[in-house]
Amino acid sequence: MNSPVRLYMSMSLDGYIVGPDDRPGQELGRDGGRLFNWLDNRHSDGPSGQVYREALATGAVISGRRTFELAGRWQGDHHDGVPIFVLTHQVDDGDVPPGCARFVTDVEDCARQARAAAGDRPVMVHGAGAAQALLRAGQMDEMEIHLVPVLLGEGRRLFDHLGGDHIELDLVRRHEDQDVTHLRYRVHRPEEAA
């Protein structure tokens, strides 16, 4: 598979990717930072280090607008100057994103542009809204879920707005590390579900 579109997302066991009240100044919500404790091992030779290095080896980023804004627009550079495609419902006149970022309003066009920009490297996806839109459009190839053994109880869920269609997944990799299980799934295309 050339340039797979791959979600990278830390998630609580009850499906939350941030705690409640996520906003500027509290981007991960209350207690949402708990989902990222595994990053303390990102420079290790262990599984979390491997997963982190793979994420930073991606050739393009697709982000939802909310994630992009809460991240301070990454000052236009998510990592290594790779192109950032921000999936948004609308673009306001005069709103020019910084650096390597650009706004795209069509999900299929966004995936197409990101794949082309990534070359032979994967495309990283950030944000629940972008992930859900890509899944609904049949444009998500893989999901790397960093499953954290905590129940947040409330916040923003990753898979709340997928619609009624059933999506099949294949577990293709599982890595256990301190305070996290890294799970990679291949997403079946809609035509494969038949």
Image (tube, helix red, strand yellow):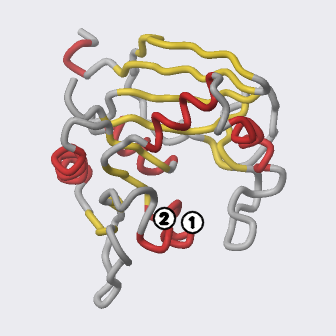
Residue at the extreme bottom of the image, as rendered: 94
Q: Say which amino acid is labelled 1.
A: Ala
> Where, by quadrant of the figure, is residue 11 drawn?
top right
Residue tagged 1: 71
In the displayed structure, 168 sits above or below 39; it is above
From the viewer's perspective, tell me whether residue 157 is left or right of residue 34: left
> Where, by quadrant of the figure, is residue 46 drawn?
top right
Mark 1 residue crowding within 10 angstroms, few (<14) / some (14–19) / many (20+): some
* Mark 2 and mark 1: Cα distance apart in space: 5 Å
In the displayed structure, 145 sits above or below 175; it is below
Kindly state the secondary structure of the residue where label 1 is placed.
Answer: loop
Residue at horizontal 51 percent and vertical 64 percent from the top = 66
- Residue 5: x and y in percent read 32, 36
In the displayed structure, 32 sits above or below 44; it is below
Residue tagged 2: 68
- Residue 21: x and y in percent read 75, 61
Q: How many marks?
A: 2
* Quadrant where the N terminus is found in the figure: top left
- Residue 170: x and y in percent read 42, 11
From the viewer's perspective, tell me whether residue 168 is left or right of residue 69: left
Q: Mark 2 and mark 1 in contact? Answer it, CB < 8 Å.
A: yes
In the displayed structure, 150 sits above or below 71; it is above
Residue at horizontal 75 percent and vertical 66 percent from the top = 26
Kindly state the secondary structure of the residue where label 2 is placed.
Answer: helix
Residue at horizontal 41 percent and vertical 49 percent from the top = 130
- Residue 146: x and y in percent read 62, 30
Q: Say which amino acid is labelled 2.
A: Phe
* Quadrant where the C terminus is found in the figure: top left
From the viewer's perspective, tell me whether residue 15 is left or right of residue 108: right
